[in-house]
Image (cartoon, helix red, strand yellow):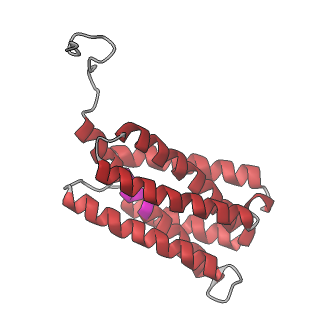
Amino acid sequence: MADTKNDPETRPLPGDRTLDQEIERMVRVDHAGEFGAVRIYAGQRAIMGDDHPKAGLLRHMHEQEKVHLDRFNKIINERDVRPTIMAPLWDIAGFALGATTAMMGDKAAMACTQAVEEVIDEHYEEQRQKLKGKDPELEQVIKDFQAEEVEHKKIAEAHGAEEAVGYPVLSGVIKAGCRAAIWISKRV
């Protein structure tokens, strides 16, 4: 049997988190992310309305995000994980991002979805690689939701995301904001 306690390759370093601490962070940030996604679609739908040609697509994606949030609401309660204290800010920021991109036009709204979902796909994949069988229930939830987030990204791309005015800048700013929100939500 290998001596992992004294092996410099596997020995924990000061400040390293335990698996339980890592999983708690995953649950907290995923809960926050799904909450933010629900708010983004709420903002887009509030501006675009139910008569807009993209209303059905937005409703479909919004409903899936609500299911994701409901599941993470259950997980956060079952596992007694403290939600992020940033929720009030994510509430406002998510709605504002959705409403603002919708005011810029349906292609900008799709660019928002594409950018957010690209970051979330990467984020979920990173979590799945960390879990690798260590928490099969959470890993399966993440895998299922990741597939739906990729679906949203593909829908956005098929509906002109990359044709939005200023797409490279818009996409870059949204991705940077998402990455910052992920970093913050893991911690507070």
Q: Residue 124: image x %, image y %?
A: 46, 48
Q: Is residue 54 above or below residue 123?
A: below
Q: Residue 120: image x %, image y %?
A: 52, 52
Q: Is residue 69 at all visible to an observer of this figure?
A: yes
Residue 100 as seen in the image, left or right of residue 184: right
What residue is at 49 percent from the left and 64 percent from the top?
Answer: 37
Foreground residue among 132 and 5: 132
Q: Residue 28: image x %, image y %?
A: 33, 52
Q: In the image, which residues are magenta? A: 29-34
Foreground residue among 7 and 69: 7
What residue is at 41 percent from the left and 54 percent from the top?
Answer: 142
Residue 73 as seen in the image, left or right of residue 100: left
Q: Is residue 32 magenta?
A: yes
Task: Find residue 61 and report its image quarter.
Answer: bottom right
What residue is at 69 percent from the left and 60 percent from the top?
Answer: 111
For the N terminus, the image quarter is: top left
Q: Residue 165: image x %, image y %?
A: 80, 60
Q: Main secondary structure of the magenta part?
A: helix
Q: Is residue 86 at all visible to an observer of this figure?
A: no
What residue is at 26 percent from the left and 59 percent from the top?
Answer: 76
